[in-house]
Every structure is written in C-alpha cells, then in structure tokens.
Amino acid sequence: MLIIWALLGVTVAAHAEGPATGTEGHYAVLSCKTGAPPPFATVDLLIGPSEGSNVWWQIEAREKDEPASDPLFQLQVLTAQPLFWSGNDKPFAVHRYILHIPQTKETIEYRDIHTNRALLPPWGSFTANFFPREVHESPSDQGLPKTCSYLGHILNLQSVKTGKVWTALKPDKVLDLDPELLIGTSRSFKDKEGHRLQFPPTTQPVDYKYVPFVEDDYKVMIEAGINLYVVQPDQMKFVRDEPVFYVCWGGEGLHFPADFYRSNLVGGPMFMDEPASIMSGDMAVMHKVRTSLDCYAVLEQRVKEQYDNEIYELERLLKQKGVNFGTMRLAQMELPIWETVFDSTFCQMSGGGSGIIHEARYQLDEFNQWMAERAGTQRKFTVDELLRYYYAFLRGGTVPFGKFWGTSIYGQCDPKIAPRAMDLAYDMGARYLWYWTSDHEHHMPWPEQLELTRSVRKHAAEHPRPSIFGPQPERDLVITIPYGTFPSIWSAFDIGDRTMLKKVQPVINKALDEKLDFDITVDDGRKITGYKRLERITK
C-alpha cells in the first residue's frame, strides 16, 4: 500500500537511556558520494522539554560550519522520543511538526485537518531519511549517538553541550491541510476570455488565450476551495504558506533540503500521463496483440516501468543542478495517473500506479448511443447511472490496492452534468477532483472551475463522509470480471467481438435498476471482501 500523508503513526518503544533536556549535539556531515561535497556542512540536534510521555527535539542544518550563522532550516518536532536509535525502522507517531526557514522568514506548523495531528511531507521513507538515525552499534555521548545517517550522508558527533536553553518556535501560521480531498487545477494559468468559446465540441476547435495566475487569482481560488496547484517559481510564494498543496513541475526555485521539509510541497510532476491511452495509439504493440490478456500484460508492465522512473523525476532534476543525495532516493510516492481509459484502472493499479483520475467528458446522449451500439443496451440512462458506471470501474479498481481515484472535468463535459459528477464522486469516496486547463476544447474555463469548486465544497460541508484513509464501509455489490479483460463501452483493449461486454452490461443494468452501491473489479484469485453480495462474470 502506498505511503499516505496522514498515516505515519505507529508509536515505538522508548529507548532505555535518552539524552537529558537541553543536550545539544554538533555534528559534521560526511559525504557519501565520492568526490562530491555534502549539501551542507553541519547539523545540530537539540533535545527539548517533555510534554506528557512525549519529547520535543530540534534539528538545524547549516551550509558552513559557522554556528552563529542562520541555519538553512530549523525544525521542531514532538514525538514519543527523539527517535535516533537503531532498530526503530517502523513509522512512528509525530504529534507536532513546526518548520522555520530563515531565508523566507516563515515559521509554520503543519497539521492534518481531520486528525489535528502533525502532517508530514509525503516523500518515500520520510522519517527514515529526513530525521537523523543512529548507525548500528554507534556509541553515544551523554545520550546522543556519535554516528548517524541523515539525508543519504553520515553525521559525525563533534561536540556535546548540556544545559542549553530551549526556545520554542512560535508559528506565524498553522496550516490545517486536507489530504483526503484534493481539488486541483492542472496548470499555472487561466483563460483570458472567462467563458466558453464553444460547446459542444467541434471538429475545428478554437483555442483560448492563457494568462499566468497572479497573487489575487490565488486568493480567489483558495477562498473557493481549490487546494492543489501547479506553480512556477515566481508563483510559489503565493501558495507555500497557505493551507494548500503544490507541485513545482521541473523543480525550479526549490532549495534542498529546506523546502523539502514543507508538508504541503508534494512533488515535481502532478501526475503520470495516460499510459493506457498512449499504448492504445502505439501501433508497434497494437498491431501485434492477439488477445485482451496481451494488452493487460503489456499495460501492467508499462505502468510499472513508468511509475518506477517518474517517482524519481524531481530527484533527477535536482541532481542535474548539483544536489548531492548520497545514498538517499527522493521518491515522490504520490503520483496518480491521469487517464481516459477508465476500465484499465485495476490493471494500472496492479502495475504499481498510486491512483487514477478519469478524464471526464461526460455527455448523456453520447453515452446512450455508445451503450446501444456497443453493448446492445436500448436504455435511456440517467445522469447518475452514467456516472455510477464510470465510477464503479474507478473505485473497484483502486480499493483492492488501498489506492485512490477521482475525476477531472474537461471542457467537453456537459456543464449540466459537471456539478453532479463532482458531488457524486465525493459521495462515493473520490480523493481527486481536478480540472484540465489548456488545449482548446479540453480546457475548462476558470470561472467554471471556481463555480464547481464552491458547489462541491458546499456539498461536502453538508454531507460529511467517513475518512477515506480508514476502513471502507460495506457496499451492496461487487461485480467481478475475468482477469485480462476490458469489458466496457469505451475500451480500446477489448480484442474480440465484445462478448464479455454483453455479459457484463445486463448485470450492471440490474444493479442500476436496484439503485445499489456497486463496484466493478477484476477476479485475480484474491479473496474479495467488503461487499454484501458478489456477482462473478466468467468467460
């Protein structure tokens, strides 16, 4: 299961002999890359006061060995203990997390709005890499380990002071962040026109004129409830101290390591781009496949290859700029797939994708026509039935892997359907509600983004849901389809005569008639739980 921002909490047993309050260790940084200097020269660790059964501690890193100089950052953390000790490789409870960056004069505390506990940055193995850890069998001096691993390098204890006065950081802002509902716009700009140029789409689309977001635009978007942004370096200052998340595509303007302690910086790329759609247009593959299982196997491995590379994209870019990571890997574990081919969700999650967002171009007349032509279903579907059809594949393909799904409204989506698409996705447990910005008729005009966001935020406030990070509620029905099949009205990978689609669709229609809360998943031999009833479709 992927690392979830809000779930970094297993308390470990206390160390037998901990350092006393006011103990400070001054460490030199030893580079673990031959021929390259470390990214900073010194680290100071200070043990703070106890608070109940927990203890405060502080870490500071400096570019040079000049104790009187400003640190690159100062971090104060309240945990079950100052967790430097060997053997504590499990995640542990962090109760408070306060970051001070002298360069920008910011002091910020980060919290999860749902738990009121610290929200940590989402990098893979965050506590193991970004907190100092005692090297195996390291001796100690007055309770502090003499040798630690930290950010891919080694810390060597140079001196220890006792009786140091603890000065608690006073946050300028407490950012209560919501990692369970991410409403995001996909670019750092908006349309100049402020209205649709055309709908429905035509064969000769007209593009919009685009202008970068400015400070006042961010104020409007944040007030509306958009809480995930793609920013350019000159826009970062408008969001980094707000209760929103942001990605910095390309890594420009980021300072290592200070910025990477910000809990609301969540990566470089925002998403993986359409592995299934791209594969469906790859004739080197599609002219040779003979079965849907061929397509399934290739797509699963393509997702694995792409994800395993792209989660290190920000690391690669920073290395090009000279950052020395030593042995550490900077992994952006949260990298959902933006995809048109919704029925490939289970396949892509089994390949390692961290989540999926469907490209929503929902139009009811088109849906009814496709159902009639491809599934043989002569039925006038409702808007909710259309949406539940798509969402059943998305939710049913992610839940088995503990991953997350969502929908993204495009300019081709019927404006009459879009508000309900957002509300129902939220009700059914979606994590991602995004908008596509740019590319002629794909573009979602900015005023509509704001209007839809305000609407779904109001709906969410009036209809609170259980945590999507907790146990899932028992649902009415799960429909299982055979492994290696793609039985949907859209699929480019349903190699054959759509026999499987025609088997599945009557079962879906019956579930819609009975107004059941249902999912569609793949029967891959695992035990399926969480549903009152299972309907298995066989070949």
Image: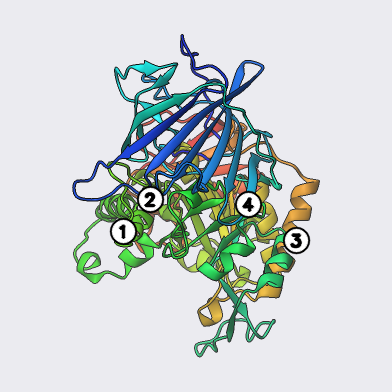
> Closest to the observer: 524 or 51?
51
Residue 110: percent from left, percent from top: 63, 42
Which of the marked residues, 1 or 4, is nearer the chain's N terminus?
A: 4
Image side of residue 518 versus residue 124, left or right: right
Task: Compute the Cα span from label 1 to label 3.
Answer: 38 Å
Which of the marked residues, 2 or 3, is nearer the chain's N terminus?
A: 3
Marking on residue 106 = 4
> Closest to the observer: 53 or 68?
68
Residue topped by disc 2 = 348
Residue topped by disc 3 = 223
- Element assignment for label 1: loop
Marking on residue 255 = none
Which of the marked residues, 1 or 3, is nearer the chain's N terminus?
A: 3
Res 369 seen here: no
Residue at 48 percent of width and 68 percent of height: 373
Visual colour scheme: rainbow
Dots 1 and 2: beta carbons under 8 Å?
A: no
From the image, state whether disc 1 or disc 2 is nearer to you: 1
Tell me the amino acid under the disc marked 4.
Glu
Q: Quadrant of residue 327?
A: top left
- Element assignment for label 4: strand
Q: Is residue 458 above or below residue 441?
A: above
From the image, state whether disc 3 or disc 4 is nearer to you: 4
Residue topped by disc 1 = 322
Residue 206: percent from left, percent from top: 55, 89
Residue 68: percent from left, percent from top: 51, 44
Q: Is residue 139 above or below residue 488?
A: above
Q: Is residue 368 above or below residue 476?
A: below
